[in-house]
Image: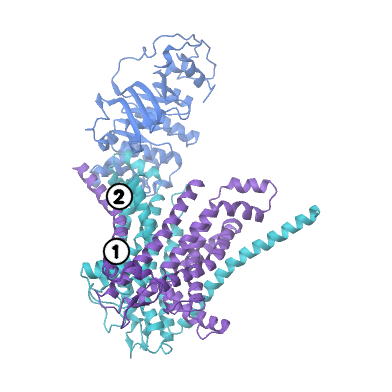
Amino acid sequence: MQRFKEKSVRYFFMVCGLLSIVILFGIFYLLLNSSFPAISKVGIKAFFAEGYWNPTAFSGPQYSIWNLIKGTFMVGAGSLIIAVPLGVACAAYLAEIASTREREIFKPIIEILAGIPSVVLGFFGLVVVAPLLSRLFNIPTGINALNGSILVGIMALPTVITIAEDAISSVPQNYKHASLALGATRWQTLRKVILPAALSGIIAASMLGMGRAIGETMTVLMATGNALANPSSFLDSVRTLSANIAIEMGEVPMGSVHFHSLFFVGLVLFLITFVINLIADLIFQHYREGA
Amino acid sequence: MIIADKPQKNSELPQEIKVKEQPRIVTKLSQKAKSSNVVQQKTKVKAEALSFYYGPTRALTDISFDIIANEVTALIGPSGCGKTTFLRIINRMNDLILGSRVEGKVSIDGKDIYESSVDVVELRRRVGLVFQQPNPFPKSIYENVAYGPRIHGIKKRAILDEIVEKSLTQAALWDEVKDRLKEFGLSLSGGQQQRLCIARVLAVRPEIILMDEPTSALDPVATQRIEDLIRTLASDYTIIIVTHNMQQAARISDTTAFFLLGELVEWGKTSQIFTRPRDSKTEEYITGRFG
Amino acid sequence: MLTKEENHHRRNVSEKFAFLSLRLSLFLVMFILGVILYDITAKGIGVLSWDFITKMPKTGMTEGGIFPAIVGTLYVTVLAALLAVPLGVASAIFLNEYATQGKITRLIRISLRNLAGVPSIVFGLFGVALFVQIMGFRASLLAAGLTLGLLTLPVTVTAAEEALKTVPKSFREGGLALGATKWQMIRTLVLPPAFPGMLTGVILGLARAAGETAPILFTGAAFFLPFLPNSPFSQFMALPYHLFIMATQHHNISAVRPIAYGTAFVLLAMVFLLNLGAIILRYRYRKRFQR
């Protein structure tokens, strides 16, 4: 009787543990399933062909997600250009230079930054950063890819800092000591020994930051302007995959081709972030075993 | 015995080994069969051709060994010799180690404890284990002792009270803690914590008590108290103790077994092991030439 | 060729300069955070009044309070917790206490990490497909709460596992050695000491859930409702969504800017209080079992 109970308890926990696999596959399956009507009507080719996203056009709706992908990667890359150098610098400082006291003060503050809801960041972009950019570049509105990149960069910062710091601190102490013993300064040691040794971890951190940036919705929705045109610079308004779903999902008739094509957009977004996260994960495992 | 077929050197014992009230004996070693002088008493635990593996590594090789009821049996040997492994086989705590495997037979009162019908939980109730580091639970002193009886279904407060008092008295701790049973077990001193852990084991009425270097973390005074306690308990329980401390083995045990590199080199009456070891390795170890 | 002193001097200067720039990047991040918090607080706190947080919106949401949005956010967060906490804790128990390091465990961990990287808008789509359509909950508190719950699941599992890892192995062994079954051991010796840590993680997860907008956009959040939700199947207003509406969708955006700031401030305050509570809790219990 007791043995039976023990076994059932074990199975109960196992089922709960397995649920995360089910959910991940469930997400993939439902996205695929719900986008299937759109795929069969529109065709994969038309989705990825160069052109415009205009499903509601009276004559000949267009379903090209070309510009959306372009916008997504612009904001993703732009935010990384901001978040990675700044984040790695902060991480290096916290891991190698800061005193214990400084670390105890700054780390919770960085957690606070991580806790700011993305909609608040978007709001900040709208009311503070946009006017600033408009004055700085002398453009009518500061709501564009640059604004989105800045805010998403800020949003990705805590992720980059935390993981890069982890990677830098896990560089074995004897590397550091060996370098210092050879007469290298702390800065030389940091630059030539520690950072290269932590490189794969830093790359993993950047990938995860990228994953977050690409998947981010509210901030870009509020700060990038969401124009469907083909963007030519960071001062142009762009629309990302995620923003596109957020804007149109609430207004499409359920069951229409348009509705299902939004699921296809979601599927593409899911796959992009999935691959990025998987790569980050592989790099991670690699450096965990290496260290 | 593996060693028996090897030629042995005759040598003399140095003088610093003290054995319970016995005069120093300088003697010649013989190559006679090893445990012939064990008087036929009731065997409580019997190991027959026992080997133990952690994955591919063999930790114990072909151990055959009788442990007599109501005696103190000391297991001695250098670190990593398998004495703790042997101890943990007797209440199957080694089952928790992944990829471990037992060959041969271990029986208690003639019953194989590795048979599939054996209830491990019940076995562990009958065979208590005291750990090297005192490990009181994060509960009150009272709840620490009442833990075992509670999980075995005793709910009546009066009975629990009685068990707690009796167990603490047996563990020579009652007088020190009777006025503060509600305090945290961790608030006690190291020696008191260890006696609390012994009381915790006594509370489930075991037949055999295993002790894994129970005094190695304690100061000499606390050690003395635990040793006295072990001698007292020996009249009611079969006690098997792993110790690093040769004097301790000599002071408290009736039988001593010497382990080396996963093999049982020799075992016999403590007085005989410490005065007339049959094997040169035993002699070298107890005279402090290695280990 | 430089002399020894010159070389030494140059190295010192470059090190100082480098460390200073690293430090400045950290200060830059702190400055950005400061500006965001200052702007929201300075312009939001003036709007705050008892009426603002306890009254319904009036005259097309240009006046009045944000009470229904606060209530809606609380409801949906609690619903998310009801799903995520039991499931997350159970998964963590499986991973940390029962699972062996095999393929399945690896797969679960990979799934969890990838689940954590799935964009929130994709969770929104999943919620639409599963809860709104397939399960027929319509756009409702229940659908949104469950969607948010799934989103929080990876955070909860990770936090619960961290908490379980802080419980010393000696508690587990001590319990098993007394004849406790595995589940008895977990229930009585592992979960109670892990509880504060779990609570910390759960609060952090909920703080994140409370600030999320994208997953609730199409699963139940409403633009405006003249009444409070009265069943799990009603739609609801939520703080982050309300902020989004006030910032970008309202017909008179400049007139409602103060309300938007007030909403942003209340949302931030709510998230920070939760974070702060979690940090304090963690700090208080961090060193409990270290000896």
- Residue C265 vs B259, above or below: the answer is below
| Position of residue A211 in the picture relative to residue C136 (left or right) | right
- Residue C29 vs B21, above or below: the answer is below
Q: Which chain is blue in the picture?
A: B
Number of disc labels: 2
Q: Which mark is residue C280?
A: none
| Position of residue A280 in the picture relative to residue A266 (left or right) | right
In the image, which is nearer the foreground, mark 2 or mark 1? 1
x, y percentage for residue B123? 27, 34
**Quadrant of the image occupied by residue B99:** top left
Chain C colour is: cyan
x, y percentage for residue A102? 57, 61
Which chain contains the residue that carries disc 1? A
Which residue occupies 52% across, 54% down? A200
| Position of residue C288 in the picture relative to residue B148 (left or right) | right
**What amino acid is at disc 2?**
Arg
- Residue B5 vs C14, above or below: the answer is above
**Quadrant of the image occupied by residue A242:** bottom left
Which residue occupies 69% across, 61% down? C16
